[in-house]
Image: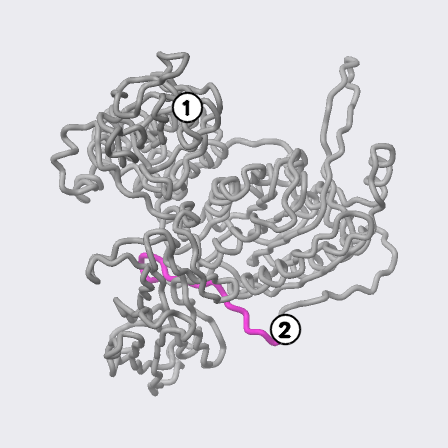
C-alpha cells in the first residue's frame, strides 16, 4: 500500500509540473551537443566477464546566470559552463546550455528538459545551476503559539531587482525560483539516476526541502558498481556552500568538480576502481573545497524517499579505455594526456630523479556491438601511436608502455602483430593490432615523466587548456602523497620492512570480520587494530574500501582505527574526509560512534617553533600547556606526552612537511598531545628551536 501511495503522489506531481499554466515562451538552448553526436554508452564487464550496461542515455542541463541587470555580474560563468559542457560530453552526456534567464524562462527550460529526457528509466540526468542565490528566513507560529524559524532558498534570475532590507522578501518571492521546485522535479521524473548541483550563494538551504528522513539502506556488496544496489534509483543534491555562505565569483567548487570527473584528482576515486560514484564525488568536494577556500563548505545529500535514495550515479574515469557501443565500425582515435596525480614523486626506475607523472593514452574501437554470430570474420588492422606533445619540455620522456583491451578480447578475436614498444628517443611508442567484427576497445598508454625544475617548483599541465605551467610544489599539497613518517610509536613497527601486512593474512582477517560468527568478528577487529598500529600505510588502504564496503567491513575498519594503541596516520588528506562523509551519511548509531572514535584516534603533524628568546614565531603558533608566560620551551625540549595549546589557528598535516596534505586546523585555545619521541625535520640545527611533532587532538 505504501508503494501504491508513493506512485500516486508521483503521478500527481508529474501532471502538475508538466501541465502547470505558463505564458507561451519560445526558448531554445543557447548551446548544445550537436544532434548527430554519437552517444557513448557506459558499458563494462563484471568480474565474471559479463557485459554490464549502466545507462542507455546521459543528459545534462546547464543554467548559467552571468549578466545580472541589478546585481553583481558573474563574468566567469560563461567560461565555466563551456568547460563543464566539454567535461560532461567526454562522459557521454548530451548537454543543453542556457544563459541569463528570467524566472519564467528557467522554469520553461526545466519543463522542456525533463519532458524530453525525464522519463527514460535507464538514463542519468545532471542539472547544474551557476548564479546568484539567497535564503529567506521565515518565522512561523506553531499550534502552541511558539515561533519557529525556517529557511527557504531561492535561485535568482538575471532580471531580479536590486535587493534591499525593505524589499527583499517581496522581490525574492515575486522573481526568485524556489529550490524546492527542483525537489518536486526530482520526485516527479522517472530516470535511474539524477544529480542536481547548485553553485550559488546560500544554496545549502536545498537540504531544508528534501522531505522526510528515512532509515539507512542495507549494507553495500563488495562488487559494488555491478550490484543491484547501484541500479536502484537515486536523486542526489550538491550545493557549493551552506545556507549561510556566499560563494566566490570564480568557482573553486566547479574547478574541483570538473577535475574530479576528468580523472585529474585521483583521490576522489577513494576505492581506486576506475569509477566515481556520487558519494565519492561528494565526499571529495566536501573535503577539498574548504582547503581552496576556507569560507566555503559544500553540502551534499539525497532525496529522503524510500524509492529514490538507494542507488549511485556513476562516472567512468577517463584513465581507462571506453567501451563504445555502436551499430557500425568507426574510428574513434583520441590522444589524451591524463594526470595520474598532481605532485612530485621519486621515480626509482629513472635514477631516483623527482618527476611529475602523467599518462599519455590513445584508444581505437573495433567492430560493432550486439552482432554475436553474425559479426564479420575479417580482421581489421590499426596502428596505435603515442607521441609526447611538443608543448612539453624537451627532456620529458615515456616509460611503462602498455597495451590493453576491453570488450571482445578472446584469443580468437584479435592478433597483436607489433607488440607495444618505445622509440629510441623514449618520446614515442607504438603498437599494431588486428581485430575481428566483435566490439572491442584497444588502449595504448605510457607514463610521461617531466623532471622537476627544483625542490620548490614543478612542471605541471593544466588539463583545462593543455597549457604547461611551472608552479610551487607547496601549491600541490592538497593531493600530494604524504611522506611516510620517519618515526613510530610502535617498537614492533620499526622492525618491519614493509608498510603493508601480508595480503593473505589481511584477506583472512577481513573475511572473518565480515563473517557470520560474532566471536570471530570481534577477534578479527582486535587483530586488525594491532596491524594498524604496526603497518603505517594500512589505515589508508582500509579506508579506501569504505565507500563500497559492506556494513561489517565499515564497522571493522572504524573499530580497528579507534582501538589502535598507537593511533593511526593517514597517508593522504582524503582519508579523513571519507570517514567524515560516511559518518554524515550513515544512520546506524553503532557505526557513527565507531567513526567518531576513529577520527579522535587520528595522528597528525604540527609545526612548533620558538624564537631565540622563547616567544612563538608566526609559523609556530603553539605553546606548552605547562607554561603560561614566555620564555617557552624550545622544540628540542619537548617530550612525548606533553600538552600544547594553540595560540591561533594551527594547520594539522598528514606528514612532517608544509607540503603534506592538510587534515584541517585546530582553533585558538584547543589542546594537542605530543606523540613523537623525537623532533622531525628540525629547522635550526644549532639550537633546534623549531620542527615537526606528531600530535593528536585533545589532552589525552
Crowd class of label 1 (few under 14; some 14 to 19; many from 20; radius 10 Å) = some
Residue at image point 38% right, 39% down: 575
Mark 1, secondary structure of its residue:
helix
Residue at image point 79% right, 14% down: 145
Most foreground residue, 556 or 223: 556
Most foreground residue, 328 or 532: 532
Crowd class of label 2 (few under 14; some 14 to 19; many from 20; radius 10 Å) = few
Vertical position of residue 469 compared to residue 222: above or below: below
Judging from the image, the colouring scheme is one colour
Label at residue 593 = 1
Mark 2, secondary structure of its residue:
loop
Which badge, 1 or 2, is on the more N-terminal residue?
2
Would residue 301 be visible to someone looking at this image? no
Most foreground residue, 509 or 467: 467
Quadrant of the rendered image containing residue 365: bottom left
The x and y percentages for residue 156 are 76, 46
The x and y percentages for residue 139 are 78, 24
Residue, far bottom: 378
Classify the position of the N terminus by image quarter. top right
Magenta segment includes 43: yes
Vertical position of residue 553 compared to residue 177: above or below: above
Measured in 3D between alpha carbons, the distance from the residue under mark 1 to the one under mark 2, in whole angstroms, is 51 Å
Viewed as shown, does residue 499 lie left or right of 643? left
Q: Main secondary structure of the magenta part?
A: loop
Q: Magenta part of the protein: which range?
A: 34-49
Residue, far left: 495
Quickly name the residue at label 2: 34
Amino acid at each position: 500500500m505504501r508503494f501504491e501511495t508513493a506512485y500516486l503522489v508521483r503521478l500527481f506531481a508529474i501532471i502538475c509540473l508538466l501541465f502547470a499554466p505558463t505564458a507561451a515562451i519560445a526558448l531554445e538552448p543557447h548551446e548544445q551537443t550537436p544532434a548527430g553526436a554519437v552517444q557513448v554508452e557506459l558499458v563494462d564487464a563484471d568480474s565474471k566477464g559479463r557485459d554490464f550496461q549502466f545507462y542507455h542515455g546521459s543528459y545534462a542541463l546547464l543554467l548559467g546566470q552571468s549578466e545580472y541587470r541589478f546585481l553583481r555580474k558573474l563574468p566567469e560563468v560563461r567560461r565555466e559552463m563551456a568547460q563543464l559542457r566539454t567535461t560532461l560530453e567526454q562522459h557521454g552526456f548530451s548537454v543543453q546550455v542556457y544563459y541569463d534567464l528570467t524566472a519564467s524562462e528557467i522554469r520553461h527550460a526545466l519543463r522542456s528538459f525533463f519532458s524530453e529526457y525525464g522519463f527514460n528509466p535507464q538514463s542519468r540526468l545532471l542539472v547544474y545551476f551557476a548564479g546568484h542565490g539567497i535564503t529567506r528566513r521565515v518565522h512561523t507560529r506553531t499550534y502552541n503559539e511558539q515561533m519557529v524559524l525556517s529557511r527557504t532558498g531561492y535561485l535568482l534570475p538575471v532580471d531580479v531587482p536590486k535587493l534591499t532590507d525593505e524589499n527583499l522578501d517581496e522581490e525574492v518571492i515575486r522573481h526568485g525560483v524556489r529550490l524546492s521546485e527542483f525537489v518536486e522535479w526530482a520526485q516527479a521524473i522517472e530516470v535511474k539516476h539524477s544529480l542536481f548541483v547548485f553553485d550559488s550563494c546560500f544554496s545549502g538551504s536545498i537540504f531544508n526541502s528534501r522531505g522526510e528522513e528515512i532509515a539507512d539502506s542495507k549494507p553495500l556488496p563488495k562488487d559494488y558498481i555491478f550490484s543491484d544496489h547501484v541500479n536502484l534509483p537515486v536523486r542526489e543534491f550538491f550545493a557549493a556552500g551552506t545556507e549561510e555562505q556566499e560563494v566566490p565569483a570564480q568557482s573553486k567548487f566547479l574547478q574541483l568538480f570538473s577535475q574530479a570527473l576528468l580523472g585529474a584528482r585521483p583521490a576522489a576515486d577513494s576505492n581506486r576502481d576506475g569509477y566515481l560514484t556520487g558519494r565519492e564525488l561528494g565526499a571529495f568536494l566536501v573535503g577539498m573545497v574548504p582547503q581552496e577556500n576556507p569560507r566555503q563548505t559544500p553540502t551534499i545529500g539525497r532525496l529522503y524517499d524510500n524509492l529514490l535514495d538507494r542507488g549511485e550515479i556513476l562516472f567512468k574515469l577517463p584513465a581507462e579505455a571506453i567501451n563504445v557501443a555502436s551499430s557500425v565500425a568507426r574510428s574513434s582515435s583520441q590522444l589524451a594526456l591524463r594526470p595520474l596525480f598532481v605532485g612530485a614523486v621519486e621515480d626509482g626506475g629513472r635514477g631516483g630523479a623527482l618527476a611529475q607523472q602523467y599518462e599519455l593514452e590513445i584508444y581505437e574501437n573495433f567492430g560493432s556491438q550486439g552482432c554475436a554470430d553474425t559479426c564479420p570474420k575479417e580482421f581489421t588492422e590499426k596502428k596505435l601511436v603515442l607521441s609526447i606533445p611538443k608543448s612539453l619540455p624537451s627532456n620529458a620522456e615515456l616509460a611503462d608502455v602498455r597495451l590493453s583491451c576491453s570488450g571482445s578480447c578472446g584469443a580468437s578475436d584479435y592478433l597483436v602483430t607489433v607488440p607495444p614498444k618505445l622509440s629510441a628517443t623514449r618520446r614515442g611508442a607504438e603498437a599494431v593490432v588486428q581485430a575481428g567484427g566483435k566490439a572491442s576497445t584497444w588502449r595504448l598508454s605510457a607514463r610521461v615523466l617531466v623532471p622537476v625544475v627544483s625542490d620548490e617548483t614543478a612542471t605541471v599541465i593544466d588539463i583545462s587548456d593543455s597549457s604547461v605551467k611551472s608552479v610551487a610544489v607547496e601549491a600541490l599539497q592538497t593531493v600530494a602523497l604524504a611522506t611516510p613518517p620517519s618515526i613510530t610509536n610502535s617498537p614492533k613497527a620499526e622492525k618491519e620492512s614493509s608498510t603493508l601486512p601480508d595480503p593473505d593474512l589481511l584477506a583472512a582477517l577481513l573475511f572473518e570480520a565480515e563473517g557470520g560468527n560474532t566471536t570471530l568478528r570481534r577477534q578479527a577487529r582486535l587483530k586488525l587494530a594491532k596491524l594498524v598500529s604496526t603497518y603505517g600505510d594500512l589505515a589508508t588502504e582500509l579506508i579506501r574500501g569504505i565507500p563500497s564496503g559492506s556494513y561489517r567491513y565499515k564497522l571493522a575498519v572504524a573499530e580497528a582505527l579507534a582501538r589502535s594503541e598507537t593511533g593511526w596516520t593517514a597517508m593522504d588528506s582524503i582519508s579523513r574526509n571519507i570517514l567524515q562523509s560516511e559518518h554524515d551519511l550513515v544512520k546506524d548509531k553503532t557505526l557513527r560512534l565507531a567513526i567518531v572514535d576513529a577520527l579522535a584516534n587520528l595522528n597528525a603533524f604540527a609545526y612548533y617553533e620558538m624564537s631565540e628568546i622563547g616567544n612563538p614565531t608566526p609559523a609556530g603558533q603553539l605553546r606548552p600547556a605547562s607554561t603560561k608566560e614566555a620564555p617557552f620551551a624550545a622544540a628540542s625540549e619537548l617530550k612525548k606526552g606533553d600538552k600544547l595549546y594553540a595560540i591561533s589557528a594551527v594547520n594539522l598535516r598528514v606528514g612532517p612537511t608544509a607540503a603534506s596534505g592538510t587534515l584541517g586546523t585546530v582553533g585558538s585555545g584547543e589542546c594537542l598531545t605530543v606523540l613523537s619521541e623525537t623532533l622531525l625535520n628540525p629547522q635550526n640545527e644549532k639550537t633546534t628551536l623549531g620542527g615537526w611533532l606528531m600530535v593528536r587532538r585533545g589532552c589525552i
